[in-house]
Amino acid sequence: MFSVNVARKAVLSVCRASLRPAVSTVISRGYRGDAPEPTLIEIQLPPWQERTGESLDIKRKRLLYESRKRGMLENCILLSLFAKQYLNTMSEPQLKQYDRLINEPSNDWDIYYWATEAKPTPDVYQGEVMDMLKEFAKNKDMEQRLDAPNLEYLDKSN
């Protein structure tokens, strides 16, 4: 009985000692205020150029891919679902508008804000396609738009 109590006290004292921080090993990580300001480098993107000599079929496939592969998930979902619904029925002038809309602006957030009408759309992007996108973004049918569409609908050979 005596040895059990001694053993218990010894174990408890070792455990308590291991839980106490060691004063000699405290490291100070305070901010000294002498860090240099970061220099931001703005990388210029090449200007958008309309592709010439591209068949409508190839243009639709490229635009579908570019609608799915965006820099942000919100646009990936919005634009890929929009492309699934409208791309195959767009005329050539509408395809040109859509191509310019999704490829010329360097900031994907701008496209999202214009489509959701959080910010006014610049005149250069106003048009029939932008009106279609704005109406689509309103989601009047209250569809669940949680992910980009599956790619099965692309395979028309079956």
Image (tube, rainbow, N blue to C red):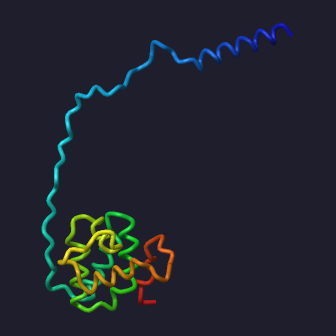
| Residue at horizontal 32 percent and vertical 63 percent from the top | 71
Q: Position of residue 115 (x, y in %)?
A: 33, 74
Nearer to us in this view, 20 or 110: 110
Q: How many marks?
A: 0
- Say which of 28 and 117 sits in front: 117
Q: Is 40 on the left or on the right of 66, as rendered?
A: left
What residue is shown at x 81% (from left), y 12% (from top)?
Answer: 4
* 81 horizontally vs 5: left or right: left
Along the line of sight, which residue is nearer the eye, 33 or 90?
A: 33
Q: Quadrant of the N terminus?
A: top right
Residue 113, horizontal then vertical, whole percent: 32, 69
Residue 116, by quadrant, is: bottom left
Instruction: Give the answer, above or below, for where 110 lies relative to 64.
Output: above
Q: Residue at x 14, y 83 (%)?
A: 52
Q: Quadrant of residue 37?
A: top left
| Up-down relation of residue 30 to residue 118 (above or below) | above
Image quarter of residue 156? bottom left
Percent across and percent down for residue 100 are: 21, 77
43, 142: nearer the viewer: 142
Residue 87 horizontal/vertical position (percent): 33, 86
